[in-house]
Image (cartoon, rainbow, N blue to C red):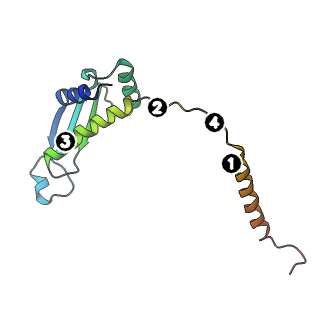
Amino acid sequence: MDLFLLRQSIHSSAEAAFSRSGGPGGQNVNKVNTKVQLRLNLSALEGLSDAEAARVREVLANRITTGDELIIDSSEERSQRTNLERAYFRMEALIAASARLPKHRRPTKPSRASREKRLQTKHIHSQKKAGRKIRPGED
């Protein structure tokens, strides 16, 4: 994965649309378009191998439209520029994280000491509960 080429590709091929945003800002939110919707066509994306692109489509399947577009919204800030920067950052992070293969897990067995510790803890717990039991004739 070439992060520099990926970043350039996202910035060049993503389309930004602006609209009015809710949230903080007073009457300013009623007259300024600060919400950003960033659309990226995944087929125009560069910097990923075919396997990484397939993995991105698999991991982000719920977020990709039928037109093969990934959509990110950002409306946290009052500034349009800040929301645009955040949307680009989130898009880059999302694609880079989903393209990475998960680490291979090697199955392990618990050590003898950990098994003995678990059994000791269970024994202590059962002794504590047995001590609470009311036995006949001990009143």
Residue that numbered label 2 is attached to = 102
Viewer-proximal residue among 103 and 138: 103
**In the displayed structure image, the side of residue 86 where residue 106 appears, left or right:** right
Which mark sits nearer the N-terminus, 4 or 2? 2
User: Which secondary structure lies at badge 1?
Assistant: helix
Residue that numbered label 3 is attached to = 85
Which mark sits nearer the N-terminus, 4 or 3? 3
User: Which secondary structure lies at badge 4?
Assistant: loop
Residue at 73% over, 62% down: 125
Residue that numbered label 4 is attached to = 108
Residue at 14% over, 49% down: 79
Report whether residue 80 is seen: yes
In the image, is residue 41 above or below residue 38?
A: above
Viewer-proximal residue among 130 and 42: 130
Quarter placement of the C terminus: bottom right
- Amino acid on which the number 2 mark rests in the picture: Pro
Name the mark nearer the viewer: 2 or 1.
1
Extreme-top residue of the structure: 50
Question: Label 1 vs label 4: CA separation?
Answer: 13 Å
Give the total number of marks visible in the rendering. 4
Which quadrant of the structure image shows residue 101?
Answer: top left
**In the displayed structure image, the side of residue 47 where residue 139 appears, left or right:** right
- Amino acid on which the number 4 mark rests in the picture: Thr
